[in-house]
Structures are given as C-alpha cells and as structure tokens.
C-alpha cells in the first residue's frame, strides 16, 4: 500500500508498506483479523515483513492452529517456546482476540477491559525535505484538531528545527522522537533542548538500552519516554527501578499482543507512569486494534493513533478511522474490532497468500 506521504525517521524513509494480515477462524466459523506491525526493513526492530511471514507460517501457526484453548490470553503462552518475534506473535494473538470478542458479541475494547469511550489523538510527523514543509504539516494537523504534535528528530534535524517550531506555534504539546539516534555523548545537546519544554524526548538512546537512559534522565528536566526499549513487562519493572523514563509508549506489536499490553498497562497504572499508544503506520486492522487498546484506563496521554486518510487514499476497513475536530476517536460499538473488513480491497492488494487448515498439520 503506497503511503499518501513518505514517512522518514532517523533510520530511513518509507514510501510503500508491505503488510501481513492474519485471518483466523474457529470451529464454529467465527473469524478474527490481525495485522503485523513490522517494517519493510529490520530497522525499528529485528523483525521485518519477509521474516515475519516465515515465522508466522512455519513456526507460530503450528503452535496455535487446531489447539483447544479457553481464552485469547492463552495464545501468548501457546507460543512461549519461541523467543522474541513479538510482532509475529501479536499478528496471530490479536486476530484471536478479535475472534473471541466477535464470538461473545462485544466490542473488543470492552472485552479487553477498556473504559474510555473516546480516545485522545496526536500525530507523528516524519522528517521532511525542508523546515517550511514541516511547519505546513504541523499547521494542517493543528487545524484538524490533533491534541499533540510529535516530530521526528535526528542529528541533522533537532535543535534548530524544534526552536523554529516553538517560535512558530508557541505553547502546543510537542514531542521529539529520536528512534535511538543519539548517545550519551549528546548529553549537552539534550540539556540545551530542555528549554524548549517538550512533553517528552522519545527513545533518544540505543534501542535496547535502559541504563544510559537513566543517566540521561538524571541530567535533564524533560521527561524521557521509552518506545523501542520496552519489550516485556520485566522491562517496565527495570525502567521504574532505575528511573530511566517518566513516560512509556506501548505498541501492540512490540510487546507481543493484547495480553502482554494489558499486563504492562496495569503495571504502569499502578506505578502512576503515564502511557500512550504508539503507531507503526498501520492499515485499518492494526489501527482498529490500537484504538481498542487505547481505551484501557492507563492510556492517559494522546497516542499516535490518527485518521486513516493521513496514511491511505483508501483504507482496508469500513468506515475508515475518523478523528473528531476535538482530536478524538470514538471507540466503535460493533463486535470485535468494530470495523468491516473490505475483503475485495484486500484481495486486490494481495501478492501472497497462505491458507492453513488444522487437519493438514
Ligand atoms: O517510533 O513511533 C515510532 C513509525 C514507524 C516506526 C516507528 C515509529 C513510527 C511512528 C509513526 O512514529 C506513528 C504512526 O503514525 O503510525
Ligand atoms: Mg517511537
């Protein structure tokens, strides 16, 4: 699926998405859908489209298909012998959650224990060809009502850019996401950027680091938010212990699905660490799962979940995800993820398909 506008982070530019979808069916004919949130390159994480395909088809499906289990929460445990590969796991796991909610005839968000009927939305704006272009994009999103603007930062696109954005837009809720582009050698730069009063610096240091972030957090007032570093509930325990951040970004794929996300949400809520839902340039199915997760009580900050039309000329769900002029999305009242799947559109976009039946295993 071609993106409406390219998306650039500190690790590169994306023009087109190659997305894996999973459709699961149970013996009673109920179905559920999941979307793999990996990138086209092993850059944000080690997983990428073709590796996920192999992992899901050859390794994970045989662990789940044809198995009798009580609840969607069991799927994570059925796959426990596989280390890592959480985006691959989440693809199947989230599909089973959708199926379970449809079977119970309840919206997935209620089934997960969500309490917020409407979620607060922000946007993530990539690195642009020019600062003027960035300012234009920010204006568009503010006009659309979004509650928080996040810009991507990198060593060629940081201090001066943030300064200009602050001078132009004043007191907006503003965040900078570095996607691991810096090291502790940059402490002085971060201290100088403290004065811009950002809501947070997201993942400034290494993708798998906790202790360097703790050192940086001690030196700056701006809250650090961890994204890439948080893979398991145990990582949350460690970042809290070392005070490595003050905010956490939760992504369904990065943590392995809804069951793990719920554990992390509860831990953060109890520790009074605010969390928000991150995005991975999802198509409609992944976006719908993000909306459901964002309704959990701990998700108190605006997430990176925004309107379908910011990404796609035409999405794969109906209705498309729309954002109110107050910058919110209403949680749907239909069963499961709550959106219709556009099967024809998906069929037209499909380049590869694998159908696996339990009795063939
Ligand atoms: O770090 O949050 C990130 C996109 C791809 C990989 C990593 C990230 C992002 C985003 C986009 O920031 C969020 C979105 O609009 O989906
Ligand atoms: Mg991020």
Image (tube, rainbow, N blue to C red):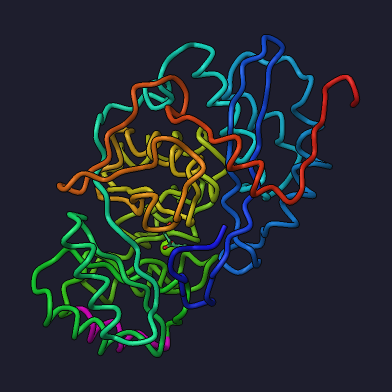
Verify whether residue 98 appears in magenta: no
Closest to the observer, 312 or 245: 312
Residue 117 position, x and y percent, is 25, 29
Ligand 1 is found in which quarter of the picture? bottom left
Residue 223 position, x and y percent, is 26, 65
Closest to the observer, 129 or 180: 129
Residues in magenta, as a range: 185-194
Verify whether residue 192 appears in magenta: yes
Q: Residue at x 68, y 50 (%)?
A: 85
The rendered magenta stretch, by its main secondary structure, is classed as helix
Which quarter of the picture shows residue 244? bottom left
Left or right, 121 with respect to 184, comes to left
- Asked if residue 340 is positioned above or below residue 11 in the image, the reply reads above
Which quarter of the picture shows residue 194? bottom left
Closest to the observer, 175 or 143: 143
Q: Residue at x 20, y 49 (%)?
A: 327
Q: Residue at x 37, y 78 (%)?
A: 153
């Amino acid at each position: 699926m071609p993106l409406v506008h390219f998306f650039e982070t500190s690790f590169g530019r994306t023009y087109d998405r190659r997305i894996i979808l999973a459709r699961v069916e149970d013996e009673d004919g109920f179905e559920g859908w999941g979307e793999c949130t990996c990138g086209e390159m092993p850059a944000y994480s080690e997983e990428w489209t073709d590796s996920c395909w192999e992992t899901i088809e050859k390794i994970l499906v045989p662990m789940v298909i044809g198995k009798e289990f009580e609840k969607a929460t069991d799927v994570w445990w059925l796959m426990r012998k596989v280390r890592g590969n959480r985006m691959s796991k989440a693809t199947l796991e989230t599909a089973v959650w959708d199926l379970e909610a449809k079977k119970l005839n309840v919206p997935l968000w209620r089934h997960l224990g969500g309490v917020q009927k409407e979620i607060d939305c922000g946007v993530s704006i990539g690195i642009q060809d020019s600062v003027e272009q960035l300012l234009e994009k920010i204006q568009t999103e503010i006009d659309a009502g979004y509650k928080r603007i996040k810009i991507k930062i990198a060593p060629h696109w940081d201090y001066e850019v943030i300064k200009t954005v602050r001078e132009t837009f004043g007191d907006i809720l503003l965040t900078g996401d570095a996607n691991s582009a810096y090291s502790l050698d940059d402490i002085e730069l971060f201290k100088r950027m403290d004065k811009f009063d950002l809501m947070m610096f997201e993942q400034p240091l290494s993708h798998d680091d906790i202790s360097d972030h703790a050192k940086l957090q001690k030196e700056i007032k701006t809250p650090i938010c961890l994204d890439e570093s948080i893979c398991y509930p145990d990582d949350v325990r460690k970042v809290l212990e070392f005070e490595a951040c003050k905010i956490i970004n939760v992504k369904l794929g990065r943590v392995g699905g809804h069951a793990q996300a719920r554990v992390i949400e509860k831990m953060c809520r109890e520790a009074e660490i605010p969390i928000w839902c991150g995005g991975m340039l999802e198509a409609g199915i992944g976006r719908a799962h993000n909306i459901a997760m964002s309704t959990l009580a701990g998700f108190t900050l605006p997430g990176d979940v925004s309107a379908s039309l910011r990404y796609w000329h035409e999405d794969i769900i109906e209705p498309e995800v729309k954002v109110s002029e107050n910058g919110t999305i209403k949680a749907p009242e239909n069963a499961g993820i709550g959106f219709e799947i556009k099967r024809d559109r998906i069929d037209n976009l499909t380049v590869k398909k694998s159908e696996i039946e339990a009795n063939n295993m």
